Image (spheres, rainbow, N blue to C red):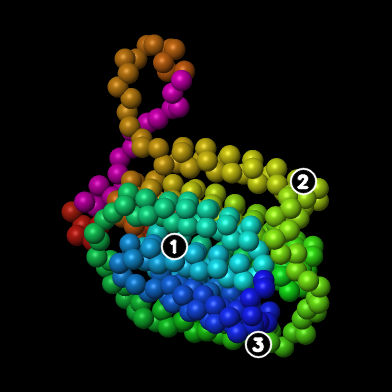
Amino acid sequence: MQLEYFLLTAAALFCIGIYGLVTSRNVIRVLMSIELMLNAVNLNLMAFSNYLDPVGINGQVFAVFVISIAAAEAAVGLAIVLSIYRNRDTVDMEQFNLLKW
Amino acid sequence: MTLAEGVQLVTFGLLVAMTLGGALGVVLLDNIVYSAFLLGGVFTSMSGLYILLNAGFVAAAQVLVYVGAVSVLILFGIMLVNKEQAFVPMKRAWLGKAATGGVCVGLFALLAASTLNTPWAVSGQVPTGDMATAAIGIHFFTDYLLPFELASVLLLIALIGAIVLARREFIPDVAPGDPASEALQLPERPRELVSSVSASDPES
């Protein structure tokens, strides 16, 4: 087992998340892609924590912080999605143009 | 982790296959409910990877927070906005998808190259293992105390903000003129659907 395996896995997961973030039409799928990217970052932090800093484990502390922030982000994101859905009656990203002039 | 090297490798391969396959399913499947359940599978296999990395506490937190809270929250979100909607195909959508795919593959190649070419200073010390929970607690209450408290405040803010944002807006039919009941209410106003203007439009 080597550090590089985990880093490559995290990189692949991050790229899949970016692809889903950019190409999805459904707004909830966009939120899911953001969660995938946060998980990739967490995997990176944990791999570095285990292989480069196995006694101090600062990376695990950061991963716990990222998990808590991600939970808050999911709650607020879904609330915003519900609010927009009530306003616009759609979940299509292409029709969310409220901030356009 | 006291498993043999081969067992670790096979477990790692299985978990990575589940993670990446599930992530591809999340992004590419048409039915969004399948995507949400696959997302739960991705989170679970990520916690397995954390256990391989000698981090039992974070693996448990991952299962509790992600599988238990975030996946369920997303499923609730899907069911609350459950709308059978055929998206209007965009012009030249394949061009955007191809460009995004190219960018993602390029980014992966870049990250992989930099990963494989960096001489990592891998530490030879024995990992903390099951004592990691105590070490995380010590970190939280000594050198990461301020971020810890800020995270708790942020969670409170997010809780209240999510409730305020997602609360259904309605016109309260309370008899006006009662200041005691009005003082307990947040100001709400009726709001017309923006899309009701274009209700005859078939695409909305």
Q: Which residue is mark 3?
A: B113
Residue B56 vs residue B178, the one in the foreground? B56
Task: Examine the rendering and report whether any part of residue A12 can be seen.
Answer: no
Which corner quadrant of the image does residue B51 belong to? Answer: bottom right
Q: Sequence-wise, which precedes: disc 2 or disc 3?
A: 3
Query: Whole-percent x and y of residue B57?
Result: 64, 57
Q: Which residue is mark 1?
A: B40
3D distance between C-alphas at marks 2 and 3:
38 Å
Q: Chain of mark 3?
A: B
Query: Whole-percent x and y of residue B153?
Result: 64, 40
Image quadrant containing the C terminus of chain A: bottom left
Q: Amino acid at mark 1?
A: Gly
Query: Whole-percent x and y of residue B12?
Result: 56, 78
Q: Residue at x 31, y 52 (%)?
A: B79
| Count of number-bearing discs | 3
Q: Which residue is mark 2?
A: B141
Task: Examine the rendering and report whether any part of residue B119 can be seen.
Answer: yes
Q: Residue at x 41, y 53 (%)?
A: B72
Q: Residue at x 42, y 83 (%)?
A: B98
Q: Chain of mark 2?
A: B
Horizontal arrangement in the rendering, residue B63 relative to residue B35 (left or right): right
Which corner quadrant of the image does residue A90 belong to? Answer: bottom left
Main structural element of the magenta stretch: helix, strand or loop?
loop
Q: Residues within 10 Å of mark 2 (few under 14, many from 20)?
A: few
Q: Amino acid at mark 2?
A: Phe
Residue B90 vs residue B85, the one in the foreground? B85
Range of magenta residues? B184-199
Q: Sequence-wise, which precedes: disc 1 or disc 3?
A: 1
3D distance between C-alphas at marks 2 and 1:
31 Å
Image quadrant containing the N terminus of chain A: bottom right
